[in-house]
Amino acid sequence: MKIAYLGPEASFTDLAVRSAFSDDERHPYVTIPECIEAVMEDKVDLAVVPLENALEGSVHITIDYLFHEADLSIVAELTSPIQQHLMIHPEQQEKWQDVHKILSHSHALAQCHKYLHHYFRGVSLEQATSTAAAAKYVSENPEQLIAAIGNRLASEKYRLMIVQEDIHDFHFNHTRFIVLSKYPRTIEIPISKSNGKTTVMVTLPSDRSGALHQVLSAFSWRKINLSKIESRPLKTGLGNYFFIIDIEQQIDDVLIPGAIAEIEALDCGVKILGSYQSYKL
């Protein structure tokens, strides 16, 4: 299979793909939308993109693109531990404490906020499309006194020196990656997995009070456990939202279809993003 992922090589998404799809053909893309569009245009079979980080929350561009732009299915989830390191070009390693700019993905910079605030207060922080892209830029500009934040594979791939290890603020840092397909399918990965999940997106009628309470009640009285509910703007005006809901089980024959039918009877819109296994890397 051909797998698209948020690159370049040695990004955290690349690490997840290497662990889950070691024998498949990997294709890096610069942005999350490009990964998603590669599946939609049949350039690849699957795409792996980040969905949520334990410290920084949801990756909004992933959620919004799946709601507004793409009609894809989540066919698996990969949960991976995240370790962030400060790295610099070997030519500048003796002066690493005097860097004038640190580059990384916005989530990585936020995950290391306490460290950066304490040791590099006043130093410019610049966002990159991924941690690997930041490492690649530092590698290609040895004359600049700059650093990147990323994983160990990135330091090896781009020949950078790790000068400070594990600089993330909390050590239970994990990221959820989702595997996207153009159509529902079963993905079997030979690693540890949970009991499965179902993810839906719900829009509410604009003229009904208590609609969200009614939606949640449809799950509650059936004793269906929800692990997440989050609102995102519909982009149609202030106060207009859709909701992404994670259900802690895969679709069965009775309970979840019954809940969805009840929600739709309330004039709510329901989009099933996927029913899938969750794997721990």
Image (spheres, rainbow, N blue to C red):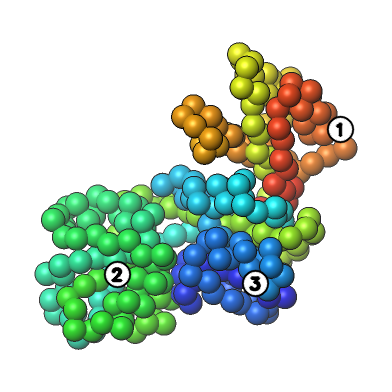
Pinpoint residue 245: horizontal percent, then vertical percent.
63, 37
Residue type marked 3: Ile
Instruction: Name the residue located 60 percent from the left edge and 47 percent from the top edge.
Output: 68
Look at the numbered disc 3 and give the secondary structure of its residue. strand
Q: Position of residue 76 (x, y in %)?
A: 68, 56
Q: Which residue is mark 1?
A: 254
Q: Which residue is mark 3?
A: 3
* Mark 2 or mark 3: whose residue is earlier in sequence: 3
In the depicted view, which residue is nearer to us: 115 or 50?
Answer: 50
Q: For marks 2 and 1, give the CA distance.
A: 50 Å
In this view, 221 is above or below 39: above
Q: Count of labels shown?
A: 3
Would you say the residues marked 2 and 1 are in contact, meaning their CB atoms lie under 8 Å apart?
A: no
| Residue 222 visible in this rendered orientation of the protein | no
Q: Is residue 108 left or right of residue 40?
A: left
Q: Mark 3, mark 1: which one is toward the viewer? A: 3
- The amino acid pointed to by label 1 is Val
